[in-house]
Image (cartoon, helix red, strand yellow):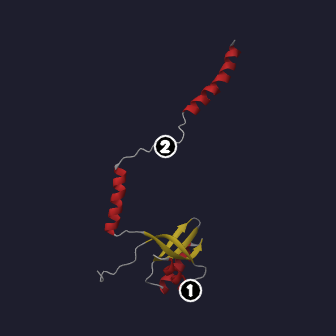
Amino acid sequence: MASGNIIRCCFFMPLFFSFLMVSAQNKGKVEVVKDPRVDTLIARRAELEKAVGIDQATGFRVQIYTGANRKDAYATQAKFQEQFPDIRSYVIYSDPNFKVRAGDFRSRADAEKFQADLKKWFTGTFIITEKINPPKTDSADE
C-alpha cells in the first residue's frame, strides 16, 4: 500500500510542477514600472550639462598608442604634447591595454588631416569614433 502511494507521488509530483511552470510564463508581455520622476531627472540632467558646458557630441579622435605598458602610454602622451601643445590628448585604460587618443574632431576629414600630420612622429595611428569634448573656447572671443 505504501509503495503505491510512493509511485503515485513520483508520477504526479513532476506533472504538477511542470503545470505550475507552464502556467507561470507570460508569453511576449513585459511591463516596465518606473517612477515618472525618472524622466524628469534625465531631462533636468541634460539641461544642467548644457548650462555648465558639458556638451558631449559624437566625433573623432586619432589613436596614437596601444599597449599594456602604462609608462610607455604616458611617455607617448608627453611626446605628443611636446609636438602639439594645443591639442587635447587622453590616456584610456581598457583591460589589458592603455590607449592614447588625441583630438576632438567633429568631422572625419579633420581627423584624417591631423592623422596625416602625425605620421612624422607616430606610426600605426588610426581614427576612432567616440564621444568628444567640445573644442576649447577663448574667453577673449566672447
Residue that extends furthest to the top in the rendered view of this protein: 1
- Dividing the picture into quadrants, the one containing residue 52 is bottom left
Q: Name the side, left or right, on which 109 lies relative to 1.
A: left
The mark found on residue 121 in the picture is 1
Q: Is residue 78 above or below residue 59?
A: below
Say few, some or many: other residues with alpha carbon within 10 Å of mark 1 (under 14 / 14 to 19 / 20 or more): few
Tell me the kind of residue under disc 2: Val
Q: Residues within 10 Å of mark 2 (few under 14, many from 20)?
A: few
SS at badge 2: loop
Q: Position of residue 41 (x, y in %)?
A: 34, 55
Residue under circle 2? 30
Residue 78 spot, x, y in % from top left? 50, 81
As rendered, which of 27 and 119 lies closer to the eye?
A: 27
In whole angstroms, how far apart are the C-alphas of marks 1 and 2?
55 Å
The residue that appears at 36% across and 53% down in the rendered structure is 39
Residue 66 horizontal/vertical position (percent)? 58, 73
Taking the image as shown, residue 82 lies to the left or right of residue 43, namely right
Q: Secondary structure at mark 1?
A: loop
